[in-house]
Image (cartoon, rainbow, N blue to C red):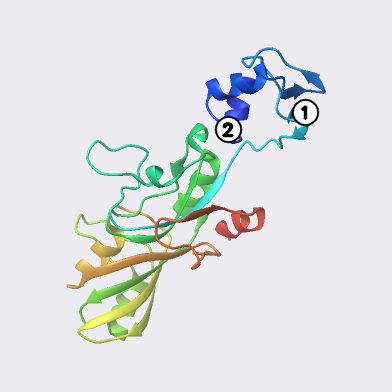
Amino acid sequence: MRLDKFLGNHGFGTRKEVKLLVKRGAVKVNDVVVKKSDIKIVPENDIVTVYDEVVMYEPFVYIMLNKPAGYISSTKDYKDETVLELIEGFEHYELHPVGRLDKDTEGLLILTNDGQFSHDVLSPRKHVNKTYFARVDGYVTDDTVELFKAGITLDDGYKAMPAELQIISAGEISEIELVIQEGKFHQVKRMFKAVDMTVIYLKRIKMGGLALDESLTPGAYRKLTLEEINFVKM
């Protein structure tokens, strides 16, 4: 990996800014002051320091975002703002969202540059639960719970995997929690539409064993700990 890319990935700025650090003599590789910012290093083996502080190699990053409504879960969009526009300081990591939340859906969204992690979390074969809180226009009953448990057939004929529906409160506007293991397009909304109900508010609150950090206000984010990364796959 190029030294300037390595330092850029670890928060030391653009290539131009890293080049300036090198020019000042602030950067060493294996205790030797470097003269060029584009030299190749082996991050797993070489020790890089900036002003004599070791830069710990971090090949992958995992970020928890409390997604607000109004943002697209995509890396780029020519019409709407994307969730990546909320994240600062990680531009060089080429982050992507792990799955998608609809534009008007809020809550837990993980962003990473680890493709294998994303595959493991999103594959139905891995059975990683996704838990949602929703307000639904319609009276959710025990019969609804059983329909979801049996597997709802969506509008395109696809039969969704069995889902765990819990009633928090039932009425003209019902509040529920729903656990699914898939991530089909607009899946939660389409599941309720199939039983003649409309989702009017939707928030993802959990992925696997990882719950949304409620101290994060909408639009706020933080890095996940190693323990939390493992929670996701539970």
Left or right: 112 as drawn, with respect to 103:
right
Left or right: 219 as drawn, with respect to 194:
right
Report which residue position mark 2 lands on.
Answer: 9
Element type at mark 2: helix
Q: Name which quarter of the figure residue 79 lies in.
A: top left
Task: Name the residue located 24 percent from the left edge and 87 percent from the top edge.
Answer: 171
Residue 119: x percent and y percent? 49, 44
Task: Name the residue located 28 percent from the left edge and 69 percent from the top edge.
Answer: 201
| On screen, residue 198 above or below 82 | below
Q: CA distance from mark 2 to mark 1?
A: 15 Å
| On screen, residue 201 above or below 138 | above
Task: Tell me the number on the disc at residue 47.
Answer: 1
| On screen, residue 58 above or below 193 | above
Residue lying farthest to the front in this orientation? 24
Residue 55: x percent and y percent? 71, 35
Residue 112: x percent and y percent? 51, 43
Q: Does residue 1 appear anywhere in the picture?
A: no
Type of amino acid under label 2: Asn
* Residue neighbourhood size for the residue with mark 2, other residues' Cα within 10 Å, grouped as few (<14), some (14–19), many (≥20): many
Task: Name the residue located 75 percent from the left edge and 23 percent from the top edge.
Answer: 28
| On screen, residue 141 above or below 49 | below
Left or right: 58 as drawn, with respect to 182:
right
